[in-house]
Amino acid sequence: MTLANKDKIRALLKSIETGDPAPVAVVNEEKYIQHNPQTQEGSEGLAALFKRLSQTSPRVNIVRAFEDGDFVFAHTEYDFSRRNIGFEVFRFEDGRAVEHWDNIQPRQGPNASGHGMVDGPTDATDHALTGANRALVRTFVETVLMKGDLDRLDDYLDTASFTDHSPGVATIADLRTALESMEDGRRLVDYRHVHRVLAEGNFVLSVCEGYLRGNHTSFYDLFRVADGKLVEHWDTTEKIAPRSEWKNNNGKF
């Protein structure tokens, strides 16, 4: 039986823990483009790298994995020298992974509402609504997060049941406060560009670039949609290293 691409990525990421070289075959290393600026390309084969990492007793949990055409996006938690939460995005070509992006931050929380960074539903439903849900999230990001039209919040969020897993944002009121806040004459949370919106059924991931407290930042936001409204949200934010510190020239996005 042929594995779905998302199951191939589950196996690949788990092999960081196990050291099993077989799942690494899903990656076409001759074409592989790495967008993590802190990862040097060509210095070590993935099989050797994962084998070496496995000897440090890492723990890898793939909480969610979804597939959108040639893309797989996964929500993960890692326990290496410290506990991190991440989103991993892979692009496939001819059945193999040829490009990779990620966004990692230290695990925090639970937030004031008691929600952790990864808990909640994990399985995609409503596959027939994938396109509509993708469009809903893109419009929300462009209208509310980028343009700052907070009067439209209620148009997009299910105010009766919305659950936020962001460490510092427990309620819709917290979200509004964060988006309204100014610091040194500029927006505290400043979304500038949406690079990609990926979806499978009722789960949608937006990949954005902007500034957080004046720092160049990548924002990955995962939403769960129900009945045409956003009902749940998870995220990671990561400060983008200055170009002088990059170990490859492929760019974060």
Image (cartoon, rainbow, N blue to C red):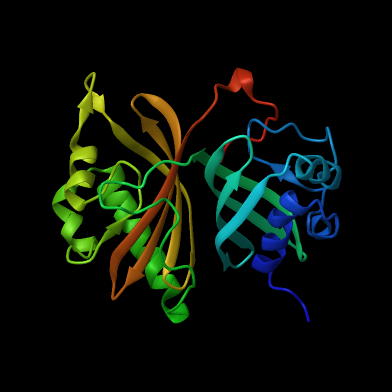
Nearer to the camera, 106 or 217: 106
Expressed as whole percent of the image width and height from the top left, the position of residue 94 reads: 77, 65
Q: Where's residue 148, x and y in %?
A: 23, 43
Residue positioned 64% across, 39% down in the render: 80
Q: Indicate left or right for 104 with 236 as reference.
A: right
Quadrant in which the C terminus is drawn? top right
Foreground residue, 168 or 34?
168
Between 34 and 172, which is closer to the camera in this rendering? 172
The residue positioned 39% from the left and 52% from the top of the image is: 116
Residue 252 against residue 246 in the figure, above or below:
below
Nearer-the-camera pick, 15 or 143? 15
User: Position of 205 compared to 70: left or right?
Assistant: left
Task: Name the quadrant containing residue 245.
Answer: top right
Residue 193: image quadrant is: top left
> Can you see residue 236?
yes
Q: Residue at x 58, y 67 (%)?
A: 67
- Image-based side of 162 in relation to 249, left or right: left
What number of labels is visible? 0
User: Where in the figure is residue 68, as x and y percent of width and height?
Assistant: 56, 66
The quarter of the rendered structure image containing the N terminus is bottom right
Establish if 43 lies above or below 84.
Answer: above
Relative image position of residue 16 (x, y in whole percent): 73, 49
Residue 72: which quarter of the image? bottom right
Task: Say if residue 30 shows up in the picture.
Answer: no
Q: Residue furthest front?
A: 57
